Image (cartoon, rainbow, N blue to C red):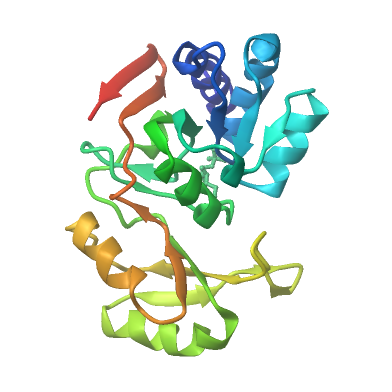
């Protein structure tokens, strides 16, 4: 099976975690796009979704799925999103699509995080994928030096030759060369550096379940 087919497989499998009558939390990315397409088949059974990005909101609305603001909903039963890396404890690196801050917000208001990923995302230790960090632009040069002191090399993410601007009007640093041996401690530490909006380690908001697309079908991992 191709990677695209594996993404479609887990996107479809995630429907079993959507409770009829409940608003669903929706992540961002190519795997989630498959989930959104599948969700459209049961749109009459749910009031709608809380979305983690402008891109997912547009896709949801185009398929006729109402989108609620996060502030309009106290708690969600489930949040469904992809990952750039996931380890055997359910810790993840996310933010390849630059939506990490809103993803973490919606994950935090959800009782369960269902991660949908193809098997290439499963890793022994986090850190091979460049770690996305959303930052306030005026802090980026100092944060690049701060990551350097940790042994990491941070680059400002560009789009069409200019710094990429997130849905929140901020920039993204992608950091390579880090050894993230204690994801919980790492997330807590980096998140309190002045100028960091959100670090793309999801350890405090880790997955509860991972639906992993493999050549022999969907494997369900629980954490
Ligand atoms: C977006 C994300 C995505 O979940 C992550 O990048 C995985 O994307 P894809 O499903 O396209 O591989 O964190 O900010």
Q: Quadrant of residue 148?
A: bottom left
Answer left or right for 216 relative to 97: left
**Residue 171 percent location from the top left of the image:** 60, 72
Q: Residue at x 39, y 77 (%)?
A: 153
Q: Residue at x 64, y 47 (%)?
A: 53
**Residue 223 percent location from the top left of the image:** 22, 30
**Residue 12 percent location from the top left of the image:** 55, 15
Answer left or right for 212 relative to 197: left
Q: Residue at x 55, y 38 (%)?
A: 27
Q: Is residue 185 above or below residue 63?
A: below
Q: Residue at x 27, y 23 (%)?
A: 221
Q: Is residue 162 above or below residue 107?
A: below
Answer left or right for 135 relative to 190: right
Please tell me how many numbered marks the rendered image carries. 0
Q: Is residue 135 above or below residue 202?
A: below
**Residue 9 percent location from the top left of the image:** 52, 16
Q: Give 71 or 197, whichever is nearer the viewer.
A: 71
């Amino acid at each position: 099976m191709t990677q695209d087919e594996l993404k479609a497989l887990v996107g479809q499998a995630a429907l079993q975690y959507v409770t009829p009558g409940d608003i669903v939390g929706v992540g961002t990315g190519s795997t989630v796009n498959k989930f959104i397409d599948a969700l459209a088949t049961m749109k009459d059974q749910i009031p709608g979704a809380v979305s983690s990005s402008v891109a997912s909101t547009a896709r949801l609305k185009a398929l006729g799925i109402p989108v609620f603001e996060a502030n309009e909903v106290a708690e969600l039963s489930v949040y469904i999103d992809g990952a750039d890396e996931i380890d055997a404890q359910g810790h993840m690196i996310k933010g390849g699509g630059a939506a990490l801050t809103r993803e973490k917000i919606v994950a935090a208001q959800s009782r369960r995080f269902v991660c949908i990923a193809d098997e290439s995302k499963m890793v022994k230790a986090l850190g091979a994928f460049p770690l996305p960090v959303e930052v306030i632009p005026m802090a980026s040069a100092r944060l690049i030096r701060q990551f350097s002191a940790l042994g990491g090399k941070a680059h400002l993410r560009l789009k069409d030759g200019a710094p990429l601007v997130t849905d929140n009007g901020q920039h993204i640093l992608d950091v390579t060369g880090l050894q993230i041996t204690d994801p919980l401690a790492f997330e807590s530490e980096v998140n309190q550096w002045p100028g960091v909006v959100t670090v793309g380690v999801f350890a405090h908001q880790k997955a509860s379940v991972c639906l992993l697309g493999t050549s022999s079908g969907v494997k369900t991992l629980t954490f």
